[in-house]
Image (cartoon, helix red, strand yellow):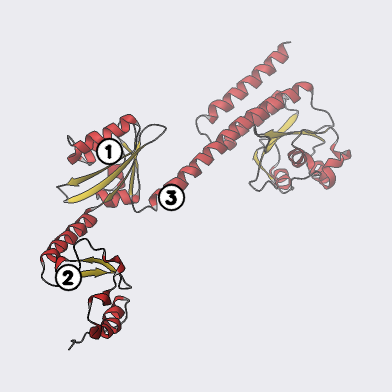
Amino acid sequence: DVTERTRANLLAVGQRSALELAVTDAPLGDVLDVLARTAEDYSGGAALASVQLMTPDGRRLRHAAAPSLPAAFQREVDAIRVGPVGAAAASAAWRAATVNSPDIEHDALWGGHRELARAHGLHASRATPILAPSGDVLGTFALYFRDRRHASPQEQAAMALLANTASLVIGQRHEAAERQAAEQRSRAILDSMSEGFIALDREWRITYANGAAEDVTQRRNEDLVGAQFWDLFRTLRGTPQEGALRDSVAGRAASRIETFDPGQERWFEINAFPMEEGGTALYFRDESDRRRAEAGIRRLAAVAEQSSDFIGIFTADAGGIWLNPAGRRMAGLGAQTNIAAWRMIDFFPREDRPFIIGQVMAALTGDQAEVVAVA
């Protein structure tokens, strides 16, 4: 039959057009509008098509496409809550099953909404749920007719095909939105970190840098993203650290290196973690302050070791941590004696201990203390 072949071709063209539009990231409403118009064309103008999407709370449906339905009708239908008696679409969404109303005027499912259909000259309808593979209701695909009738078997088959196509497109958009939301959450977490973070592709090109990376590298984000890592850390070239990083990426194993940038006179700690999808995640921080502090401590320790004065380090509650050689000699302690069991007052004559307890130990806890000479 020529007419059936023409209608089948029209259906195939409409489906293909919708899918081609979907892959261009066109607005979802535009894609669903193509499917709705295809249904109307397939019916020869006898049907008015509607595609509604479920709201996030699952309580209502909202029109995404309805090329021929009056705007006033769409607004009224959008206000209907999903339920067992909620006109065609809301009832189909409630049941997760097709609802056929060949005579709206005498269909109990339309309940108090018959007047709405009558006011817009609609006398029959058929609504089918748009289902996700999980069975969740994504929306509905509905046909409305101006005369009392059943949808023909061909119209029912076409409607099922178009609803499945809508399910595919809507599902893909939901997945894309979920991925985008997950990426945004990840970026928010990364941007809240105090450590610098950059993501590298397989060619060592920076694809992402968080705010701390800008601070640590003293470069703007636009100067980081797209740049080669080895251009950023030029001083690593030809060093054992470069070899360690490259071996880490090639072997898909985590690694940690420390490197000094003579140009900035700064130390960096870099932790590399190869990613499953390829590329590498680098966490790094400026270790210059820690290095300088450690060097200062070592210098002070060297001075304390050579001093002839009693020099000790104690906890806030006056427990022993460290005592220099002169202090050990004065206290009669050997070089290997563990002073952790000793308290500060143990190193002073009994007559001086009230002063130590009342003044020095009080100062260790943050209390005010006046230092006076011990007679």
Which disc is residue 327 wearing?
Answer: 2
Q: Marks 3 and 2, how far apart in space?
A: 53 Å
Q: Marks 3 and 1, how far apart in space?
A: 22 Å
Q: Residue at x 19, y 86 (%)?
A: 374
Name the residue carrying label 3: 188
In the drawing, does residue 327 fall left or right of residue 246?
Answer: left
Q: What amino acid type is highlighted by mark number 1?
A: Ala
Give the mark toward the camera: 1 or 2.
Answer: 2
Instruction: Kindly indicate the quadrant of the structure image that contains residue 89.
Output: top right
Dot 1 surroundings within 10 Å: few (below 14), some, or many (20 or more)?
Answer: some
Q: Residue at x 35, y 48 (%)?
A: 210
Which disc is residue 308 wearing?
Answer: none
Q: Marks 1 and 2, how far apart in space?
A: 56 Å
Q: What amino acid type is highlighted by mark number 3?
A: Ala
Q: Percent x, y for residue 166?
A: 63, 31
Instruction: Kindly indicate the quadrant of the structure image that contains residue 366.
Output: bottom left
Name the residue carrying label 1: 227
Q: Percent x, y for residue 213?
A: 31, 48
Q: What amino acid type is highlighted by mark number 2?
A: Gly
Q: Is residue 328 above or below residue 65?
A: below
Earlier in the chain: of badge 3 and badge 2, it is 3
